[in-house]
């Protein structure tokens, strides 16, 4: 841990700020020095006298700056020993996961659980903000705005379409890198997304290996055309009556949908394309007295390493949330250091659970 005092010269500092915003300009300058590495974790800040002289501000302003940085958890003060950057400043190792809804879906739940794992394994910190849909009356919105204003975030992982991100001023601050988990690349915000077609390709590979040819698919409406196309391309039976859209707003109706589908069809495989439907689909299979896997091969979507518990024998295919978060953190880290980043990173589905050594892996950000 370094204890060298940083030098802030008149030439490297900003112009003297005016009016009541003086302390904000000085505080932001020091925050940026910490973020860019000019002030390292454990390093002593310049003395109050030096800051006062270099920025041409009053002692009261310097005191206010130090109080703000200390309240944000960025610096610590040692009695009669000066002020130091904390060992793990939030502007380097605290990340925000932004959710649109107040309730987290299966993917968001898996993502938050994996973030907790990374916190344990790597010492990073994650905050999550719910209900951030652009309205300032949201508690999550206000918390996020406060943390951004106080420089308490190293980056944002936003589980929302990129067009919504572009429309919100929250995600336009160039000081805080942002990555999206939905949509297409737009502007400066890169996207990490799971590749839905790879889920279906893996499922069809399992079918061929098991000698099955007639799949039924339960999926949300927007992904059904992808399933139909890939089934036809694989030379399997693509009966449109076996391709059923689940109700996004009422997933519990999947139970009756599956029960009827199994009773009236001769499908030899059932593909459940979203893990939020798995429990309901299994209840429908039980109600239909389906023989799994003798008569019906069951293939379920999951988010590794947090699959939905299954009471029936099933092949699980899904996306590794550890890889998703690692890709996000790598992009945020590259952005913070001014390195070029790809506009799009694709995570493919796998039929195997992730290896333990890859769970929670993340770049060394300090």
Image (spheres, helix red, strand yellow):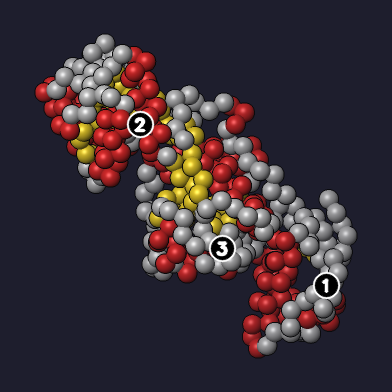
The reply to whether discs 1 and 3 touch (Cβ–Cβ < 8 Å) is no
Q: Is residue 216 visible to us here? A: yes
Q: Position of residue 312 (x, y in %)?
A: 31, 19
Q: Which residue is mark 3?
A: 147
Mark 1 to mark 3 CA distance (whole Å): 26 Å
295 or 121: nearer the viewer: 295
Q: Quadrant of residue 38?
A: bottom right
The reply, left or right, for residue 228 in relation to residue 363 is: left
Q: Which residue is mark 2?
A: 200
Q: Is residue 78 visible to us here? A: no
Q: Residue at x 47, y 69 (%)?
A: 169
Q: Tag 3, which secondary structure?
A: helix
Q: Which residue is mark 1?
A: 8
Q: Quadrant of residue 7?
A: bottom right
The reply, left or right, for residue 149 in relation to residue 34 is: left
Q: Tag 2, which secondary structure?
A: helix
């Amino acid at each position: 841990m370094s204890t060298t005092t940083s030098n802030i010269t008149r030439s490297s500092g900003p112009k003297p700020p005016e009016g009541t915003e003086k302390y904000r300009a000085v505080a932001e300058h020091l925050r940026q020095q910490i973020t860019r590495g000019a002030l390292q974790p454990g390093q002593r800040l310049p003395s109050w006298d030096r800051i006062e002289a270099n920025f041409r501000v009053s002692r009261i302003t310097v005191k206010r700056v130090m109080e703000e940085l200390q309240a944000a958890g960025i610096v610590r003060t040692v009695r009669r020993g000066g002020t130091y950057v904390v060992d793990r400043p939030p502007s380097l190792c605290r990340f925000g996961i932004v959710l649109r809804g107040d309730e987290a879906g299966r993917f968001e739940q898996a993502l938050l659980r994996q973030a907790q794992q990374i916190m344990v394994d790597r010492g990073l910190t994650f905050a999550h903000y719910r209900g951030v849909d652009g309205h300032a009356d949201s508690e999550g919105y206000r918390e996020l705005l406060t943390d951004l204003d106080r420089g308490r975030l190293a980056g944002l992982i936003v589980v929302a379409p990129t067009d919504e991100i572009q429309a919100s001023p929250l995600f336009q601050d160039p000081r805080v890198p942002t990555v999206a988990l939905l949509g297409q690349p737009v502007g400066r915000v890169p996207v990490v997304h799971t590749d839905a077609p790879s889920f279906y390709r893996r499922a069809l590979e399992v079918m061929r290996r098991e000698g099955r040819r007639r799949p039924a698919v339960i999926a949300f409406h927007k992904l059904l055309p992808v399933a139909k196309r890939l089934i036809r391309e694989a030379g399997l039976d693509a009966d449109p009556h076996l391709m059923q859209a689940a109700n996004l707003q009422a997933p519990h109706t999947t139970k009756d949908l599956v029960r009827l589908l199994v009773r009236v069809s001769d499908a030899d495989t059932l593909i459940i394309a979203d893990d939020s439907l798995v429990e309901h689909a299994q209840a429908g299979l039980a109600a239909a007295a389906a023989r799994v896997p003798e008569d019906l091969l069951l293939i379920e979507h999951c988010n590794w390493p947090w699959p939905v518990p299954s009471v029936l024998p099933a092949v699980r295919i899904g996306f590794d949330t550890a890889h998703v978060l690692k890709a996000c953190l790598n992009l945020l880290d590259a952005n913070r250091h001014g390195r070029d980043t790809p506009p799009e990173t694709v995570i493919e589905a796998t039929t195997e659970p992730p290896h333990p050594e890859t769970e929670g892996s993340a770049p060394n950000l300090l």
